[in-house]
Image (spheres, rainbow, N blue to C red):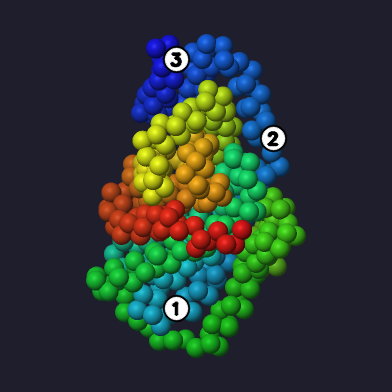
Amino acid sequence: MAALTATIAPLLIFAVLLVLGVPVFAAMGLGSIAFIVLGGGSLQMTLFADTLFSSLNSFALIAVPLFIFTGDAIFEVGVAEELLDFVESMVSSLRTGFGSATLLGCGLFATISGSNASDAAAIGRITLGRLGETGYSRSYSAALVASGGSTGVLIPPSISYIIAGVTLGISASTLFLAAFIPGTMILLGMIVVNIFVNRSKGYESGGQFQGFRAIARAGWEAKFGLMVPVIILGGIYSGVFTPTEAAAVAVGVTLLIGLLYNSISLGAFPEMFERSALLNGIISPNIAVGIVFSQVLVGLGIPAQVADAVGGASQSFYLITLLMIAVFIIAGAIVEITPNIIILGPLFLPLATEVGMDPIHYVVVLVSALGVGFITPPVGLNLYVLSGISGESVLDVARSAVPFMVSMLVIVVVLAWFPGLFMWLV
């Protein structure tokens, strides 16, 4: 009875604090302290302080603020519009030309920023007006960009995969390699959804093919912007850079582009640093306290207990993976992705390995499923970002995003059940 109380009471404290609107990192911290105090001496309070420091004392995590700054700098420099013009020139003749270009632009920007919110905000500011002029409704336009923006954490380089790698002790470079095909599959699924919705609603009619010369011209105009993802991903996949080094190089290249374009001045730096620092200041406490919370759970043997309980109920690979995906989807709908990765990652890893999932496969499914949460109420960060930009209500944007949500769910299940589709890369 005492052991049950020592487990249930801290979890209730954590849940109640979340419901009351206490910041997630504070709820996790107080929950960790409750676990330690009620643990009957099995854990020492020094674990809290030691882990709090060591969790952020990681070379890999230096990439997080650097990628955040790169995404902000790319938008400030002004090459985001040129990247969008380039992808639009390639699909302009399609009936869903600009809608597809918007999604492709989100995917291309994702290879630079590593962040969903900055991806959605940057593309949203550029495309919402044009989408309306093309014929799309305001709420659907916002949903389109919100959904496409979620690829910011699904297509490498992704801050979420860096955090997952640090939490579970897996190389971020390996995770980036494994995540490329799944992220691309989810993006292509969104494009297919947009094609069907467009044909149903008649939002956009096809234009004329601009010709290969126009594509080449647009590519040349976007050459500096295209250089950044080539340098980042090429350097990582070839082994020339670690993700952290690639992030530092990306910052340098982006600022150099700004100087060459004469589109950035020293006066813009304080505001850019402030915006990036504010976003990093949200992520870092969640990482630090989340890893403490995770270590406490591991120290008490809770992940092993979860694996034994679920594994005892069923040994079906398909059923257990569906159960895990359901938990990840629900968690992603009510808590932001960073604490979810840090808490749920170690919690379900023993169960995943027990049913035969490779840890890398497991992480891809975890992050991909949690990515659905960006367009799922009530938390749905991208919904709020696009609601603020478009002026549409969050519920209207969420309602229009349902087809994209279904597409993402289907692909997540496919990724869970058929790992051979992407695991061959690693």
Residue, far right: 240
Secondary structure type for disc 3: helix
The type of residue carrying mark 2 is Asn
Closer to the eye: label 3 or 2 = 3
The type of residue carrying mark 1 is Val
Nearer-the-camera pick, 42 or 89:
42
Secondary structure type for disc 2: loop
- Look at 29% across and 64% down and name the residue there: 137
Residue with the mark numbered 3: 3
- Look at 41% across and 31% down and name the residue there: 309
First of labels 3, 2 by sequence position: 3
Image position, residue 55 (x, y; %): 64, 33
Image quarter (top left, top right, bottom left or bottom right) of the N terminus: top left
Q: Residues within 10 Å of mark 1 (few under 14, many from 20)?
A: many
**Is residue 301 among what the camera can see?**
yes
Name which quarter of the figure residue 277 lies in.
top right
Residue with the mark numbered 1: 91
